[in-house]
Each structure stands twice: as C-alpha cells, then as structure tokens.
Image (tube, grey):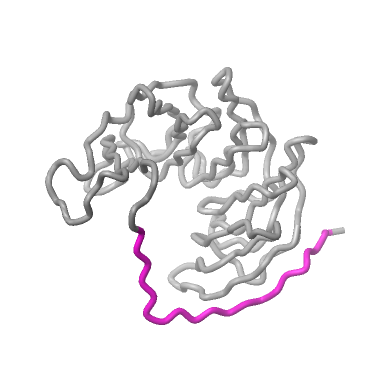
Amino acid sequence: MENKKIRRYLVWLLIGVSIIVIGVLGNALIGNGESAIDQNSMQKQGPDANIKKTDNENPKSRRNLVYARSSHTATTLNDGRILVVGGLGSDKKPMSKVEIYDPKTDTWTSTNDCRSPRADHTTTVLKNGNVLVVGGTSDVGVASTAEIFYPKTETWEYAGRMNFARQTHRATLLNDGRILITGGKGVNKAIDAVELYNPVTKAWSRAGSLNFPKYGHTATLLPDGNILVAGGGEGFVRQVHGEIFYP
C-alpha cells in the first residue's frame, strides 16, 4: 500500500521582488552552457570581482573543460574537487563523459565514464561522500536508472531503477541520509510521483505524490528537516504553488 505523506498546500504571491548577491566569499565556477554551439569554456568569479568592471579580468578566464557540454551537472565533492557528469555534447546527444576540476591545481582531468549517457539528470553527494546520479535523458529516452560514483576510486556502480523515468526533476539529501526525488518530466508529461532512495539498503520506494505535477521546480531542505517544493510547471504553464514534504 502506498505510503502517503502529509503535505501542506501553500500559495505565494511575489510582487516586485529583486534579488542581489553582493560580496560572495569564496569562488564560483561557471561552466558555460549552450548558446549557438556548446562551449567548453569556464570562468571563475570570486571576492576580487568588481560588478562595475566589464574588462577581461572580470570574470577571470580559467582553463577549459575537456569536453564541450550543456545540461550537465557540477557537484562539489567532499575533498573540494568538482565532479562534472554527462550533459549534451556538441552533437546535441546525451553523453557519458565525466571529468573532475581540481581548484588547487586549476586543472581538468577526464575520469571513467558513467554507465549511461544522460542529460538533465541530478547528482547528489551522499552522507558517505559518494555521489548518486539519477534519471535524466539518455540515448534511448527518459531514464529511470541511477548509479553511484565513488570519488576515492573514481569508479561507478549501478544503483537500481526509479519507479518512474524522469528528467529535470529534483533530488534532495534528507537529514537521515535518504535521497528524495520530486517531480520531473516523464515521457510525455510532468510527474507528481515522489520517490526515496535509501543508500543503506540500496532500495527505491514510493513516497506519495505532489499535489501538482511539475518539473523545473526547487526542492529545499528546511532547518526542521522538512522539504519545501516550490514553483516549476507543466508544459507552458508556470506555477506559484508551494508544498511541504514531511520525511
């Protein structure tokens, strides 16, 4: 029997809101995505950046990726390196190429390919430092498969299948170590089904449904351990809906 979770339905109205980020500590990596062609250039912004400057020093040009890509993921590993997985290559097809950026040496290094080509997937660092890669668009359509990357050995392991194939979904690490998968786009429509991955048992399970099917939304861990799911949409319809998932 499906384990339904209690959810609270919220509606927000935002009027004339502007968000400005000033004086960020640390550095941010920008892996350029798709324009007329896929790019493999990368830029770096940090505390020495001046938002009024438009010369070549802002942002600072950094070394290029090994492979041109868009719709990929970039995830900070526990050792500070950046793991870049999949995406759409120059041929506009999902790719399985994986590379790692080391900010200490300012270098990119190719590593073992993921098991399945994918784009518009999610990558999440688990409590033990390994990385769970889920769903996305593969070379044969929308993917339900998942796999785990082991940073210490730079190897991959199959991690089962979700109950629903999905892309542009969200994956959120819960306080108890499980991964919550919400929404996404299936083969022909948005998905409302919610799933959980347990890294201890390596099993997938259903966890009820969202009140509104959606993709392109956000799913944020709150201080109390609950998850706020907000926005997103279905087709050309954009949503103002918000709801809370109680693990």
Question: Which residue appears farthest toward the right when viewing the image?
Answer: 1
Which SS does the magenta portion mostly show? loop
| Left or right of residue 227, residue 117 in this image | left
Q: Which quarter of the figure is the N terminus placed in?
A: bottom right
Instruction: Depth check: give the residue in front, 61 or 164.
Output: 61
Instruction: Depth check: give the residue in front, 24 or 109.
Output: 24
Residue at image point 37% right, 67% down: 19
Task: Check residue 19 for magenta coloring.
Answer: yes
Question: Which residue appears farthest toward the top when viewing the image?
Answer: 153
| Left or right of residue 244, residue 11 in this image | left
Instruction: Depth check: give the residue in front, 146 or 178.
Output: 178
Residue at image point 62% right, 50% down: 172
Q: Position of residue 18 (x, y in %)?
A: 36, 71
Q: Is residue 124 above or below residue 183?
A: above
Task: Check residue 79 for magenta coloring.
Answer: no
Q: Which residues are magenta?
A: 2-21
Q: Quadrant of residue 220?
A: bottom right
Q: Is residue 10 above or below residue 48?
A: below
Residue at image point 39% right, 39% down: 93
| Left or right of residue 222, residue 208 in this image | right
Q: Position of residue 183 (x, y in %)?
A: 60, 59
Q: Position of residue 32 (x, y in %)?
A: 30, 43
Q: Which quarter of the figure is the C terminus placed in?
A: bottom right
Q: Quadrant of residue 101?
A: top left
| Left or right of residue 199, residue 131 in this image | left
Q: Is residue 156 above or below residue 11?
A: above
Residue at image point 49% right, 24% down: 113
